[in-house]
Amino acid sequence: MKAQEISKNIDTLQENIDAMLVELEITINNLVPINKE
């Protein structure tokens, strides 16, 4: 694999991880009721 391809794959992985983290955060927020007082 060329370095350019590896770099592109890493960028894709980072985007996927970011999306997964957002979904995880939403899921956690839905599971844990937050007391807003």
Image: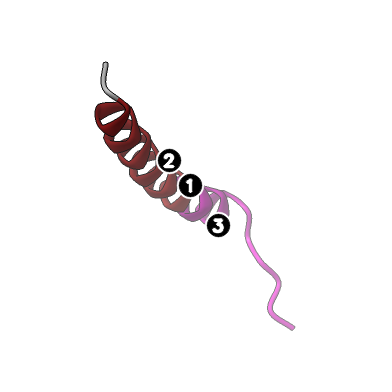
Q: Is residue 8 left or right of residue 17?
A: left
Residue under the image location 74 percent in, 83 percent down: 37
Q: Which dot marks residue 17?
A: 2
| Residue with the most extreme top position | 1
Contact, mark 1 vs mark 2 (Cβ under 8 Å):
yes
**Could you say which quadrant of the image residue 29 lies in?**
bottom right
Q: What element does badge 3 sit on?
A: helix
Q: Amino acid at mark 2?
A: Ile
Q: Is residue 15 left or right of residue 25?
A: left
Q: Amino acid at mark 1?
A: Leu
* Gap in angstroms between the C-alphas marked 3 and 1: 12 Å
Q: Position of residue 24 (x, y in %)?
A: 49, 45
Q: Say which residue label 3 marks.
A: 29
How many neighbours does mark 1 have within 10 angstroms: few (below 14), some (14-19), or many (20 or more)? few
- Given residues 36 and 18, the one toward you in this image is 18
How many neighbours does mark 3 have within 10 angstroms: few (below 14), some (14-19), or many (20 or more)? few
How many neighbours does mark 2 have within 10 angstroms: few (below 14), some (14-19), or many (20 or more)? few
What are the residue bounds of the magenta stretch? 24-37
Above or below, 7 relative to 31: above
Q: Say which residue label 1 marks.
A: 21
| Residue with the most extreme bottom position | 37
Frontmost of labels 1 and 2 is 2
Q: What element does badge 2 sit on?
A: helix
Q: What element does badge 1 sit on?
A: helix
* Gap in angstroms between the C-alphas marked 2 and 3: 18 Å
- Given residues 17 and 11, the one toward you in this image is 11
